[in-house]
Image: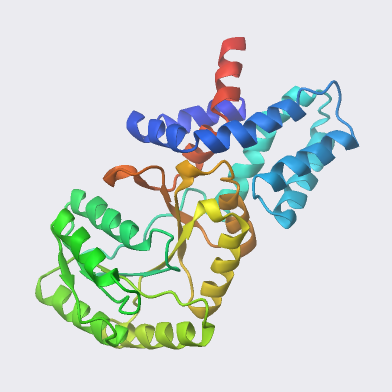
Amino acid sequence: MSFFKRLKESVSKTTESVTNKFKSGLSKTSASLAGAMDAVFMRSHIDEEMYEELEDVLISADVGVNTTLEIVDRLRKEVKERRIKEPAELQPLMSEILADILKGEAAHSPSMNIQDGELTIVLMVGVNGVGKTTTIGKLAHYYKQQGKKVVLAAGDTFRAGAIEQLQVWGERVEVDVIRHQAGSDPAAVIYDGIQAAKARGADILLCDTAGRLQNKVNLMQELTKVHRVIQREIPGAPHETLLVLDATTGQNALQQAKIFNDATGLSGIVLTKMDGTAKGGIAIAIRRELATPVKWIGLGEQMDDLQPFITDQFVHALFANAIAQEEKVQ
């Protein structure tokens, strides 16, 4: 069975609406990345020039230099071991390699560490303008739809309007928001959020935080203090520390991820605005260079367009045209 066929069978296990969201949200990246690879693999034979063209395509899609070199090296090795002669046979092999990198050591796409019957604390970090507050609102909506009771803590007391923006989302999703005045101690807000979540029998507490990359010392100190307060109140928490990144910023997103990973141990990445970029290869670069899984992906503006990241859905959406072509041939 070809990898494309196995991929389609895996994708068929999720709902058609999810598959369509991935296809629609990743259409720009698919047209750019997979479309450019199509052109490379239309060559008459496999040679060094083809590999160089493929490297250019991957780097242009923000896959990153190091990750690109690894991918092409793995492709060379597989071509040699499988004795592949025709460039047309390389598209499914490329999708297999990309899926393997995205999954990392996990056999399946990564899931959230939700505590069964206990309060789960999720710490959200990220710079201004990446869609962090909107992501928190959409996460609250997602888990409320799952029957969970959610509380929000407005820990970004630094950015003007952040507290009010989170309050608007709380009202929209109909969940409680724990807030202090602007300029308050973020750790105190998170502390009150934990106490309120416990008192109200909440399942999940989503904590907003400020992102001050212009001053890494402040960022480090603030997040360290927040972590200390959370761990004192609930040993083992936060159960998730998610970094929100704007996919349209490309390699800059990777640099942000490295800084936040140094400041606080990240458990996962949320990639927003994937529908607005043709350079979705950043998801692959992040997974490979940080060894941090992408756990959520923003595929549009609607409330339910924030979706759990499913590796097979991602790869299937990227190579949708090639998969369709293979089906026609068969």
Residue 157 occupies which quadrant of the picture? bottom left
- How was this image coloured? rainbow
Return the residue found at the far right.
48
User: At 63% from the left edge and 37% from the top edge, which residue is drawn?
Assistant: 33
Return the residue found at the far top.
329
Q: Position of residue 292 (x, y in %)?
A: 54, 62
Q: Position of residue 93 (x, y in %)?
A: 69, 34
How many numbered marks does the figure carry?
A: 0
| Vertical position of residue 193 compared to residue 88: above or below | below
Return the residue found at the far front.
160
User: At 52% from the left edge and 49% from the top edge, which residue is drawn?
Assistant: 107
| Vertical position of residue 101 compared to residue 323: above or below | below
Q: Nearer the viewer, residue 70 or 106?
A: 70
Return the residue found at the far left.
200
Q: Position of residue 252 (x, y in %)?
A: 59, 61
Q: Is residue 305 visible?
A: yes
In the rendered image, the quadrant that contains the N terminus is top right
Residue 305 occupies which quadrant of the picture? top left
In the rendered image, the quadrant that contains the C terminus is top right
Q: Position of residue 101 (x, y in %)?
A: 62, 50
| Vertical position of residue 115 compared to residue 178: above or below | above
**Residue 84 in the figure: left or right of residue 175:** right
User: At 37% from the left edge and 46% from the top edge, which residue is drawn?
Assistant: 307
Q: Is residue 204 visible?
A: no
**Residue 204 in the figure: left or right of residue 60:** left
User: At 85% from the left edge and 20% from the top edge, which residue is drawn?
Assistant: 44
Q: Nearer the viewer, residue 76 or 210?
A: 210
